[in-house]
Image: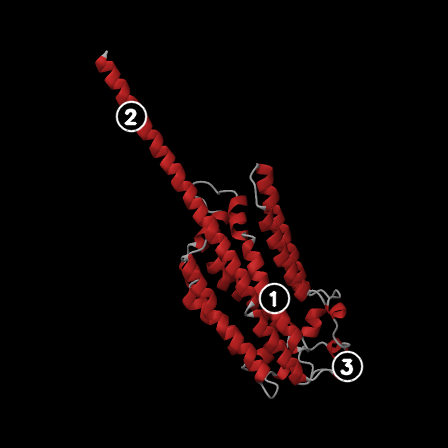
Amino acid sequence: MDHSGHGMMTDLPPFTLGRGLAWSADPFFLIACLLALALYGWGVVRLTRRGDKWPVGRTVSFVAGVLSVLLMMCTKLNDYGMVMFSVHMVQHMIISMVSPILLLLGAPITLTLRALPTAGRGRKGPRELLLMLLHSRYMRIITHPAFTIPLFIASLYALYFTPLFDFLMGSKVGHIGMMVHFLAVGLVFFWPIMGVDPGPHRPGYVMRMLELFAGMPFHAFFGIALMMASSPMVETFENPPASLGIDSLSDQNAAGGIAWAFSEVPSVLVLLALLFQWYASEERQARRKDRAADRDGDKELEAYNAYLASLNTRGG
């Protein structure tokens, strides 16, 4: 059964990593990725010409995030992902849990705010509109854990265990929309937890860790459910093309194993990023306190010297 509507999908040879990484560009994601790289590059160049510094690590992280999306959506992995549950699950996990982390560590919003010019008094340009959006009620809602955690969980259960998944996989537009949704869900879930950019919801580091681990068990349970199933659970992948030489149930079990494994890997990455940010924050706070103490010490010394000078004057 070819739900994708692309006849070539039925003629795919058995999957190998070499075949999966062959170039097969999706025009939407190719244009979107190139545009993201161009805009980010423009921001970095603008800051550099102005004499401002932008951390190289952030640029590397953002570029890696965009390339990870490009790898998933503009190679044969995308073609195989239309007919193989296991390959589709690799796409889903990378785009929803690895790409967002890398993109967020690139601090694109901070770069945009620093690169865009101010519109001037009484006027609203792109920079002012972005600031209004960041401080809006809408952003407070979609970055709140009461919204992000259920959305993160529903993107698995409500999608794969209902007819919605088969409906979306039935068209090119539906498939693109689903992948964009996976990326967006990952961004709004991880942004309040470990994003470098400013946001309306930014709890303390302990709360961020709790938010991270609140969603991950459900991810693991989803993977286990696919691994333990005794029959195919998603109609799209029920009858894979004979040319692939795969069994749909074995492929579904492999997809479950991939989903289960990915609940651990990004958790470790985010936890390490959080601990590093926490340490850096404590260091900055300690330096501020030291500077404040030095200033207070200088004032006390000046006051003491003035007192000695006054005594000397009276003595004279």
Q: Quadrant of the N terminus?
A: bottom right
Which residue type does callout 3 highlight? Ser
Mark 2 and 3 residues: CB-CB less than 8 Å, in contact? no
Q: Residue at x 69, y 81 (%)?
A: 2
Residue matched to label 2: 304
Mark 2 and mark 3: span between their CA atoms?
89 Å
Residue 172 is drawn in which quadrant?
Answer: bottom right
Rounded to the nearest whole Å, what is the CA distance between mark 2 and mark 1? 63 Å
Image coordinates of residue 155 in percent, x first then y, are 52, 73
Which is closer to the viewer, label 3 or label 1? Answer: 1
What is the C-alpha distance between the residues marked 3 and 1?
26 Å
Label 1 CA crowd tier, 10 Å (few <14, some 14–19, many 20+)? many
Residue 190, compared with residue 256, is above or below; it is above
Left/right placement of residue 142 relative to residue 229 reads left
Does 227 sit above or below residue 134? below
Q: Between disc 2 and disc 3, whose residue precedes?
A: 3
Task: Please say whether residue 142 is visible from this viewpoint.
Answer: no
| Residue, disc 1 | 94
Task: Report whether residue 187 is seen.
Answer: yes
Q: Nearer the viewer, residue 241 or 286?
A: 286
The disc placed on residue 184 is none
Image: 282 above or below 144: above
Disc 2 on helix, strand or loop?
A: helix
Position of residue 41 measured from the top left corner of the image (x, y, whole percent):
62, 48
Residue 303 at x, y percent in the picture: 29, 26
Q: How is the image coloured?
A: secondary structure
| Residue bearing mark 3 | 243
Q: For the residue carrying disc 3, how many other residues have a C-alpha within 10 Å: few (<14), some (14-19), or many (20+)?
A: few
Position above or below: 309 against 187? above
Quadrant housing residue 93? bottom right
In the image, what residue occupies the spot 33% across and 30% down?
A: 299
